[in-house]
Every structure is written in structure tokens, then in C-alpha cells.
Amino acid sequence: MKRKSLLLVSMIMVCLLFLAACGSSDEASGDSAGEGEGEARNLRVSIGVNDKHPEYDAAVKFKELVESKSDNLTVEVYHSGQIADDRSAIEMLQFGTLDITIPSTSPLVNFIPEYGVFDLPFSIPNEEVADQVLDGEFGDKMLDMVEDQGLVGLAWWENGFRNLTNDERPVATVDDVANLKIRTMENEIHLDAWKELGANPTPMAFTELFTALQQGTVDGQENPYPTILLSNYPEVQEHVSNTNHVYTPFIFLFSQEIWSQLSSEQQEIVQSAAVEAGKYNRELNRKTAEESLETLKEDMTFTEVTDEEYKKFQEKVQPVIDKYKSEIGDEIVDEYYSEIEKYSK
Ligand code: TK8
């Protein structure tokens, strides 16, 4: 009797060990979203600028990188706000009805006030400092901050230094800004800054801007040189000035709801492609900005803002910076400025 019960116990142990091994091998083969090559999916990317802009070229680069590395991911790029403007595209990511958008950071302040640091006028002094601040711990912290909004921040791309255009008069000094109807992004810091400078600002989605300039609903706008040239603003604007008043990043955002459905292998492919295409975007954007300025000097009336006048712009908007330092949060603003100082030496 004893021999039979021992045999039975041994057989049960062998079965249990076998089942345990099957269980672990199932986990290893990984059919769940977290493991293996994941399910086939087409990723839609929405950007606001048109297909002549460096951001579009970088989005196509992202598509090529993903499709070359993945067996089951495809990418479609929709430019010119065909799917939605920046703010609506962000909301579509939150609802899981769009996969990717790469907007300016400015509309994000409507969801995450801390993102207002990037809108503080005259803060980032040049692209080199921008890269070091964004690619360092501070930039990583800011990317992580979007998680509470149903978003995944994958990489920093570049919109660039913003410059003023208008159809009324040359702008060389703060006084020249008086009463200009300036379109701003949907961002209260930009609105307040242009009010403080004496303008009459109006917030508006980028997708509506060309028509508003064409119809004279607004006198002017502010954007980096590539956007000014490649959005055909010289057709509807006479004057451009090198105000360089804000450096705006583009942020590569992925819907968190859709991200969680990707396998870890697919997530790795998408993340590395977003970062690599971002480096390509920065390089192309800077080259295009130089070339665009030269063309704009031919197509428009360029007015130089001298260093002396530039300081007066900075002094004039200081009250806005002070006001938003406490609204954004003293701690994050202090950290932002100390990062800028650290890399400006
Ligand atoms: C494009 C926008 C745009 C921005 C603006 O998606 O709204 O003026 O500078 O380029 O993000």
C-alpha cells in the first residue's frame, strides 16, 4: 500500500511540475500585449504644419523607421491639421481615437500648467541650450508629466524660435507693437505677454491662421521662420522682425490607451524611431530656418530688432514672467531657469 501511495504522490508532483513549466513557457512565448511582436496596427500621425515643413519630413522619417523595423506596424502621416488642430488632436489621443500627434508644447498648458515654462518669453537663449535642457533630466521629467493626462511623451522635436510678422508696419521697438491685432496660440502666457507689449492679441488654432491673416481678422502672428515661409504668410503679410521671443518645442505624444495595447517590442520600435526622427527634425529645422530667413528677406520687409531694443522687450514682459512664475509653480520654474543657466555657461 505504501509503495502505491508513494507512486501516486510522485505522479502528481511530476504533473504539477509539468504544468508549472507550461505556464512559464506560455509567459515566455507571450501572447499578451506586453510580450512578443504584438497585433498588427496602423498608426495615424496628426501634425498641424503642411507637407513642405521640416516637421512633415521628420514624420515621414519616423514612418520609414517604424516600418523598416516592424513586421506589423504601418504609419500614416496627416499634415495641415487634416485630422484635427493641436488641441483637438491632444484630446483625441486622450480618448484613444488617434495614435500620435506632435504639437507645439503651448496648447498643452490647457491640460498641464507646468508646461507653461516653455512659454516664458526670452527664457531659452539658443538651440544648443534648448537641446541640453530638453534632453536632460528636466526634459525627461516634463515628458513623464503627461502620463496623468492619458498621454505618453516619447521625444522632443523642434518648432523653434518664434518671430513676429504683421501687415501694418515695421516692428523695431516695443512701441511699434502698439494695438497690433496679433494671433497667438491658445495659451494664456502668450496672450498676456502680447497684451503687456501693447498689442491686441487673439488666441486661435493654427489651422485657422492663414485665412484670418488673408481676411484681415488679425494683423499679424508669430512663428518660426520655416513656418512663416512654408505656410505662405508672405502672400498675406508685409513685415517680419527677428523678435526671437520664445523657443517652442514640438512634443511627440502617443495615446496612452493605444500605447498599452502595443507589445513591448512594438513600444521599443516606436520609441526609438520617435527619438531618432526627432534628431533628424532638429537638424533639418535649423538648416531650413536659416534658408527661410534669407528667402523672407527677399519676399517681405525685414526689420532688425537691435540688442538694445531686444532688452526693452525683455524688460517690458518681466511682469508677465513674474505673474506666471507663481501660477506655473515656483519650484518647476526655478528648476527650469537653473537648467538654462547651467547650460548657458
Ligand atoms: C502646428 C502648431 C504651430 C504653432 C502655432 O501644429 O500654433 O503657431 O507654432 O506650428 O503647433
Image (cartoon, rainbow, N blue to C red):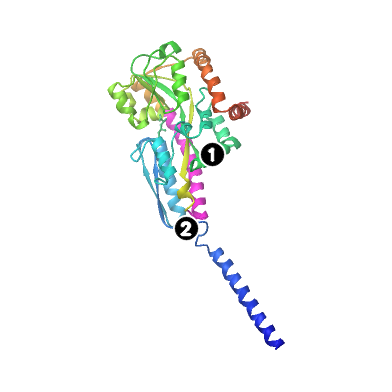
Q: Residue 295 at x, y = what percent?
A: 37, 25
Compared across the picture, whether 167 is left or right of 15 comes to left
Instruction: Name the residue located 46 percent from the left edge and 44 percent from the top edge.
Output: 254
Quarter of the N terminus within the rendering: bottom right
Q: Secondary structure at mark 1?
A: helix
Instruction: Name the residue located 60 percent from the left edge and 70 percent from the top edge.
Output: 21
Q: Earlier in the sequence, mark 1 or mark 2?
A: 2
Q: Residue 275 at x, y = what percent?
A: 51, 43
Which label sits on residue 249?
none
Which label sits on residue 143?
1
Q: Residue 221 at x, y = what percent?
A: 38, 23
The magenta stretch spans which residues? 262-291
Give the distance between the C-alpha atoms of the residues marked 1 and 2, in whole angstroms: 25 Å
Compared across the picture, whether 304 is left or right of 168 comes to right
Residue at image mark 2: 38
Residue type pointed to by label 1: Leu
Q: Is mark 2 within 8 Å of ligand 1?
A: no
Look at the image and tell me whether residue 124 can be seen.
no
Look at the image and tell me whether residue 70 can be seen.
yes
Q: Residue furthest front?
A: 1
